[in-house]
């Protein structure tokens, strides 16, 4: 529905297209492509390098660093932008230290890179998004074992050549999956790019619709974004085509994961290489925001913050509930009746994650508002009663958009849980006289509880951090923690936004904890 609505709106605004083509799209598209390229390169270098080090090498603090490298996932990109801007500002600790060391007094006395640029946005987004590539690449490096690497070593290849010529090509499918997630999150971001002054396509949609009052123009930009998303998905599928291999265990006498031992200076360099990304992507933003929050502890009990917290919890809970219920139905349907219709429905329902939040917001609000107006017109004509905005003027629109966006996460987690349950369980239950419903209720549901709760938790946290769709769909005088932070930061009051920001970060640490525990629970970690 959102995509159909956007295409319909865009096709009715031909008068806006020439202005967009000449004044908006060239600059916005170029900056979006430049930002995507920079973030992709940054996350590839950082994610693949650190993944190979912790998976293939042994050095001091390797196990601890393998956990810390996941921590930046808890920092939403817009919070990282606010924190980096404060950290690298003229009055921040870095420039203050530079002036103290070299005796400078004003900004004219020295040059310092500006964070509010495209390069700054690449640094900010790359610092918090590289774990997507790291996790995917690390899992693939661990799956490869030693067999392929040992064969290459016996042919005279050194560790670096084995990595470049053997391990990296084998890990390419997983790296492309991680990069696709990075690209989707980069396209979805609106808080960081607006705060850093980078006019991407996402920001152009927001600006054209709300600030310039052109709905059709915003829909046309959204169509360009959808084309870009489709191109990214096509590139990802094409890169993974024919990139398959099978891994087999070596004999028990040769451990699959005997790592290359790095001692002395090389070990310290490897540890430093793995320590720098979490320091940049997690520790600096958390310390900046946490320091501000510590000086404003009284705000934790303020009415404004408690109201935003309640709204965030309510929206996130409803989103998680609806998404998990629908995802469970889809996953169970594909398990019990793997027909082309159910498989197509499950795949179609999971495409929402590829649609940026601003595009979803526009495609959600217009159909809901049309429905509200139609109901209101009928009731006015028949009974003289005005219903107002039933759906578009409430939190329903936010829940709907977030459910569409995060359905992929819930459906993938629950489907993975079903795949671990043998179909023979269903068959054995049916042969003992249980119906399909009884089998689901007494056999499958208890065994699926961990996967279902994990899916609900992941959707809950992601909905709490969501800004792009929430900022455009929220009713009047309705704030979540994310929009509260956005409002304060937009008025240059990052200090006042710090308390809500810390709560969001602490909530984001929950799924990171589960991911880290899952990694450590494997024998190959």
Image (cartoon, helix red, strand yellow):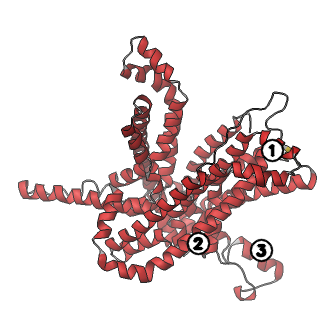
Query: What residue sits 17% from the left and 58% below the top?
Result: 374
- The answer to whether residue 17 shows anywhere in this view is yes
Tell me if residue 64 comes above or below residue 247 in the rendering. below
Query: What residue sits 42% from the left and 34% below the top?
Result: 334
Sequence-earlier tag: 1 or 2 = 2
Q: In which quadrant of the rendered view does residue 339 lie?
A: top left
Tell me if residue 37 comes above or below residue 410 in the rendering. below
CB under 8 Å between callouts 3 and 1? no
Q: Nearer the viewer, mark 3 or mark 1?
A: 1
- The answer to whether residue 297 shows anywhere in this view is no
Whole-number angstrom distance, CA of label 1 to CA of label 2? 36 Å
Q: Nearer the viewer, residue 456 or 50?
A: 50
**In the rendered image, which quarter contains the N terminus?**
bottom left
Q: Nearer the viewer, residue 508 or 519?
A: 519
Residue 204 horizontal/vertical position (percent): 44, 73
Tell me if residue 154 comes above or below residue 489 in the rendering. above
**In the rendered image, which quarter contains the C terminus?**
top right
For disc 1, the marked residue is 149
Local crowd size for mark 2, using a 10 Å CA cut-off: few (<14), some (14–19), many (≥20):
some
SS at badge 1: helix
Whole-number angstrom distance, CA of label 2 to CA of label 3? 32 Å
Q: Please give the label number shown on residue 34.
A: 2
CB under 8 Å between callouts 1 and 2? no
Sequence-earlier tag: 3 or 1 = 3
Local crowd size for mark 1, using a 10 Å CA cut-off: few (<14), some (14–19), many (≥20):
some
Residue 360 horizontal/vertical position (percent): 39, 59
């Amino acid at each position: 529905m959102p995509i159909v609505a956007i295409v319909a709106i865009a096709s009715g605004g031909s008068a806006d297209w020439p202005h967009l083509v000449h004044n908006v799209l060239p600059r916005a598209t170029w900056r979006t492509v430049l930002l995507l390229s920079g973030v992709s390169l940054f996350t590839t270098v950082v994610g693949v390098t650190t993944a190979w080090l912790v998976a293939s090498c042994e050095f001091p603090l390797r196990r601890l660093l393998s956990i810390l490298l996941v921590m930046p996932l808890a920092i939403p990109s817009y919070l990282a932008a606010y924190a980096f801007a404060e950290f690298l500002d003229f009055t921040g600790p870095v420039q203050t230290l530079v002036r103290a060391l070299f005796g400078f007094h004003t900004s004219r006395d020295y040059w310092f890179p500006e964070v509010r640029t495209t390069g700054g946005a690449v640094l900010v987004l790359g610092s918090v998004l590289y774990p997507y590539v790291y996790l995917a690449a690390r899992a693939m490096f661990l799956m490869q074992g030693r067999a392929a690497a040992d064969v290459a070593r016996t042919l005279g290849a050194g560790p670096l050549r084995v990595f470049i010529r053997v391990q990296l090509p084998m890990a390419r499918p997983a790296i492309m999956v991680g990069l696709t997630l990075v690209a989707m999150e980069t396209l979805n971001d609106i808080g960081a790019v607006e705060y850093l002054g980078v006019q991407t396509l996402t920001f152009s949609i927001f600006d054209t619709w709300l600030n310039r009052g052109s709905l059709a123009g915003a829909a046309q930009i959204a169509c360009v974004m959808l084309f870009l998303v489709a191109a990214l998905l096509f590139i990802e599928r094409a890169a993974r085509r024919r990139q398959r291999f099978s891994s087999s265990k070596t004999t028990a006498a040769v451990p699959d994961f005997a790592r290359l031992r790095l001692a002395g200076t090389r070990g310290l360099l490897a540890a430093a290489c793995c320590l720098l990304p979490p320091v940049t992507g997690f520790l600096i933003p958390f310390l900046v925001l946490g320091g501000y929050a510590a000086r404003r502890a009284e705000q934790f009990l303020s009415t404004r913050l408690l109201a935003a917290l309640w709204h965030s919890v309510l929206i996130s809970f409803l989103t998680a509930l609806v998404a998990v219920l629908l995802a469970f139905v889809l996953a169970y349907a594909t398990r019990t009746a793997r027909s082309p219709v159910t498989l197509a429905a499950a795949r179609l329902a999971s495409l929402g994650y590829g649609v940026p939040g601003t595009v979803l917001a526009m495609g959600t609000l217009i159909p809901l508002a049309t429905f509200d107006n139609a109901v209101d017109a009928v009731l006015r004509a028949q009974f003289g009663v005005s219903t107002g905005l039933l759906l578009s003027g409430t939190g329903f629109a936010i829940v709907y958009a977030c459910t569409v966006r995060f359905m992929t996460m819930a459906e993938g987690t629950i489907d993975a849980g079903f795949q671990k349950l043998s179909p023979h369980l269903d068959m054995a239950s049916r042969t003992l006289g249980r119906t399909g419903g009884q089998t689901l209720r007494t056999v499958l549901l208890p065994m699926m509880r961990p996967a279902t709760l994990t899916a609900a938790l992941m959707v809950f946290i992601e909905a709490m951090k969501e800004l792009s769709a929430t900022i455009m769909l929220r009713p009047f005088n309705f704030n979540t923690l994310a929009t509260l932070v956005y409002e304060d930061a937009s008025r240059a009051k990052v200090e006042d936004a710090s308390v809500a920001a810390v709560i969001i970060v602490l909530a984001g640490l929950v799924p990171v904890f589960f991911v880290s525990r899952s990694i450590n629970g494997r024998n190959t970690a």
